């Protein structure tokens, strides 16, 4: 099932129960910090492996359901960060049922090759992310983002490749990711304490600010 497929009737109930159980398990674990893979990557091989990824990430404005949010942009994202994210899905410290299933069968070399493929496919014209935020929310998010600057940069361009670029990412995805860090559905010794005291309004403002910056692109071309 793709991240954005819709389920009719009561068919979503077993998936919801499985999601709750999986997330609870992730919260109980104490996970060591992941690092980028020190492997020579082959982006051409990565392109062949990543064909299943483009069914969601290759469709502009594609949305996850239950809950609903935009599937994140990955074209032009930092390769080291993609490697860390896929490792986290593979071991279960980052929760998303479809992504965990996709990552479960990937070897370290597969992950490195996929990451290299997406990282080099960003287009030259940076884009803003999809957002319905007001100018006031964006301004408030900029004021709140001071604690994010050491890692993610003043305008959402990461200071190190092991961290994600946030500029131009979809607001709804950023908001969802921040909520997952706050709830423990994503494991991070850095992010968890930073968002622990933030309410939903604050998370929405941060997401609005970074989505309003030009950065990641929706599709990496042919």
Image (cartoon, helix red, strand yellow):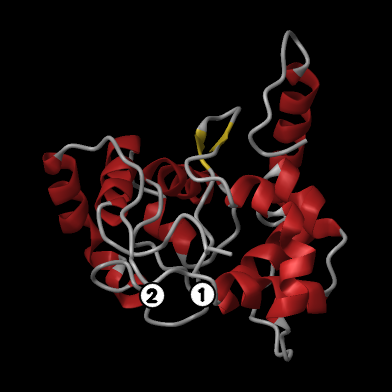
Q: Which residue is mark 1?
A: 78
Point 28% across, 62% down: residue: 214
Locate residue 119, reporting x and y percent.
Answer: 55, 74
Q: Is residue 185 visible?
A: no
- Graded by Cα atoms within 10 Å as few (under 14), some (14 to 19) or many (20 or more), the crowding at tag 2 reads many
Distance CA(mark 1)–CA(mark 2): 9 Å
> In this rendering, would 205 be left or right of 70?
left
Which comes sooner in the sequence, label 1 or label 2? 1
Locate residue 217, reporting x and y percent.
Answer: 42, 60
Q: Which residue is mark 2?
A: 158
From the viewer's perspective, is residue 85 above or below residue 133? below
Query: Residue at the top extreme?
Result: 9
Point 58% across, 78% down: residue: 80
> In this rendering, would 25 be left or right of 188?
right
Locate residue 34, reporting x and y percent.
Answer: 66, 74
From the viewer's perspective, is residue 154 above or below residue 166? below
> In this rendering, would 138 be left or right of 204?
left
Location of the N terminus by quadrant is top right
Task: Examine the image and state in which quarter residue 25 appears.
Answer: top right
Location of the C terminus by quadrant is bottom right
> In this rendering, would 222 be left or right of 190?
right
Task: Examine the image and state in which quarter residue 17 appears.
Answer: top right
Q: Please name which of the two marks, 1 or 2, marks the residue nearer to the observer.
A: 1
Task: Examine the image and state in which quarter residue 166 appears.
Answer: bottom left
Point 40% across, 48% down: residue: 170
- Graded by Cα atoms within 10 Å as few (under 14), some (14 to 19) or many (20 or more), the crowding at tag 1 reads many
From the viewer's perspective, is residue 46 above or below residue 53? below
Query: Residue at the right extreme?
Result: 105
Is label 1 in contact with label 2 (beta carbons under 8 Å)?
yes
Point 75% across, 10% down: residue: 10
């Amino acid at each position: 099932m793709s991240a954005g497929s819709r389920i009719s009737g009561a068919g979503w109930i077993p998936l919801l129960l499985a999601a709750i159980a999986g997330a609870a398990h992730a919260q109980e674990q104490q996970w060591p910090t992941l690092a980028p893979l020190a492997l020579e990557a082959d982006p051409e091989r990565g392109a062949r492996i990543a064909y299943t990824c483009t069914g969601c990430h290759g469709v502009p404005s594609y949305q996850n359901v239950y809950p609903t949010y935009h599937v994140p942009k990955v074209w032009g994202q930092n390769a080291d960060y993609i490697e860390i994210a896929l490792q986290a899905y593979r071991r279960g410290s980052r929760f998303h049922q479809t992504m965990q299933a996709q990552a479960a069968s990937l070897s370290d070399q597969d992950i490195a090759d996929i990451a290299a493929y997406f990282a080099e496919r960003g287009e030259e014209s940076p884009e803003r992310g999809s957002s319905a935020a007001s100018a006031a929310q964006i301004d408030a998010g900029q004021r709140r983002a001071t604690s994010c600057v050491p890692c993610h940069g003043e305008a959402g361009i990461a200071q190190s490749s092991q961290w994600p670029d946030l500029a131009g990412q979809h607001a709804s995805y950023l908001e969802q990711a921040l909520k997952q860090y706050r709830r423990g559905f994503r494991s991070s010794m850095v992010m968890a304490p930073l968002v622990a005291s933030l309410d939903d309004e604050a998370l929405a403002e941060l997401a609005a600010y970074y989505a309003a910056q030009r950065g990641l692109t929706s599709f990496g071309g042919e």
